[in-house]
DNA sequence: CAACCCCTGACATAATCTGTCATGACAATC
DNA sequence: GATTGTCATGACAGATTATGTCAGGGGTTG
């Protein structure tokens, strides 16, 4: 990769992450750390407001923007392909939200890429791997609850249970296994972490009541999982 | 004046004038006209949509300076989720191109959405539905060939065959079934449409030779498919 | 203290840039 | 048709810049 594309990529990367190290960039672009330092200097000299956090990495001043992003044709095609893949997943909210995001993204395509993306869309299809049944609609709300530390009140129905139980939970992590979305949460009823399949959540409400981060670590949780397929 | 500042100045100048000639810029920056032509090429390659008016000069695409789209939090979460889902697919190019596109998209997030998206990323995981083996790397190139009407020369190995056969094809459609990417193409060897699994393409090259659209209709093709799971 | 991060200068080598020259195309005007 | 003004590209020699390696230095955090 030559210099100008690399400088632009560094700028994009800085805008896409809160903090990034020189080593990470050097690895990503296949150059030496010394070259990254030089690039950073060069961007600064060109007026880019890069912030250095001692011992941590680089970030960029909030709100700094030079020009809109431009996608390569392969990237556009990957977005279209992803849309078809996501359309086959089992959460209605995910499908809808992703499609809405894509509409916005597509509006930024240059006109020649726009016609090509429409052509690709008409010539591609992704078949469902299993029966195509929407199983839940809870993923988006559960994600929002998790990243905003909002408690959730829900009625949950276990597989072998006749009745639902009322649960008040603090969502800590979400994973997908065998096409089923599962939330790991601190359960107020059980006073411990429990897993809940989202398709078994019968009714739920995201509360305004907040919870404190209990420091749940997803990697650690799965590192001791007996099922090897569920190790990271 | 060295290169990077000059490129930035050219970009600034283009944004501030309706039309500007190469000679005018050469005079302004004290470089040759040939260098300006090179700079323009370089900016174009970097994604800047420069418009050439024959015999008149250069301008920049209208709308280039509009502010980027804004996403809702749910849409951001859907993008992050999609990234995890796509990371489990079986084409290396797709995974990589989608990730690159996502970096660019993430660079447009406002900083509070950025920290939330990073939090979600750390608390989510999608397990592979089957063994996580990369099967091919051909999808992106095949997509490009298809939308740009470029022929492809490839060595293809059928399941029961000992040898590969050389094929020259015109890609007409692409679909994914049971996590396998398949291209439907007009095959010059067979003088008819054939399907090819991309993981069985052993070596390929996108040619500069172009083909004419034969009007292949994907919906029609699958409407008469005996396998009901493969109907639209 | 160790680990992690950022920082700069010097140097040899590699890579890229630059101006000049030549050639070609297109549009507008006379 | 000829002329003018513009954009466009390749080739080449010489100039300039970029790069990786090595050495040395600093700050922050647990």
Image (cartoon, coloured by chain):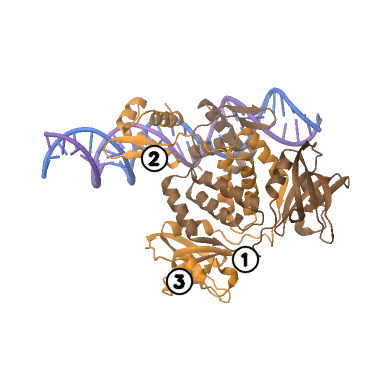
Chain colours: A brown, B orange, C purple, D blue
User: Could you tell whether A177 is left or right of B214 in the image?
Assistant: right
Residue found at the far right of this picture:
A190
Disc number for residue B41: 2
Secondary structure at badge 1 equals loop
How many numbered circles are shown? 3
**Secondary structure of residue under mark 2:** helix
Q: Position of residue B203 (x, y in %)?
A: 51, 64
Q: Of discs 2 and 1, which sits in the foreground?
A: 1
Q: Which residue is mark 1?
A: B178
Q: Is residue C24 left or right of residue A173?
A: left
Q: Residues within 10 Å of mark 2 (few under 14, many from 20)?
A: some
State the residue in front, B74 or B165: B74
Rendering coords of residue B12 (x, y %): 42, 29
The residue lying toward the viewer, choosing from B25 and A126, is A126
Disc on the earlier residue, 2 or 1: 2
**Residue at x 51%, y 43% (from the top left corner):** A1
Q: Can you identify the residue that label 3 sits on?
A: B193
Q: Residues within 10 Å of mark 1 (few under 14, many from 20)?
A: few
Chain bearing tag 1 is: B
């Amino acid at each position: 990769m030559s210099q100008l594309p690399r400088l632009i990529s560094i700028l994009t990367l800085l805008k896409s992450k809160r903090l990034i190290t020189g080593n990470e960039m050097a690895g990503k672009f296949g150059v030496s750390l010394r070259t990254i330092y030089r690039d950073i200097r060069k961007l600064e000299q060109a007026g880019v407001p890069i912030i250095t956090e001692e011992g941590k990495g680089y970030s960029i001043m909030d709100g700094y923007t030079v020009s809109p992003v431009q996608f390569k044709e392969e990237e556009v095609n990957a977005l279209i392909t992803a849309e078809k893949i996501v359309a086959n997943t089992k959460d209605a909210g995910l499908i809808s939200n992703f499609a809405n995001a894509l509409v916005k993204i597509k509006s930024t395509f240059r006109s020649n890429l726009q016609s090509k993306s429409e052509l690709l869309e008409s010539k591609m299809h992704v078949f469902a791997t299993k029966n195509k049944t929407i199983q839940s609609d809870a993923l988006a709300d559960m994600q929002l609850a998790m990243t905003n530390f909002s408690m959730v009140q829900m009625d949950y129905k276990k597989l072998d249970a006749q009745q639902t139980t009322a649960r008040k939970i603090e969502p800590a992590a979400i994973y997908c296994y065998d096409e089923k979305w599962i939330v790991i949460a601190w359960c107020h009823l059980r006073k411990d972490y429990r897993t809940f399949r989202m398709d078994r959540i019968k009714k739920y409400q995201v509360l305004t009541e907040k919870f404190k981060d209990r420091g749940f670590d997803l990697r650690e949780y799965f590192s001791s999982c007996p099922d090897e397929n569920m190790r990271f």
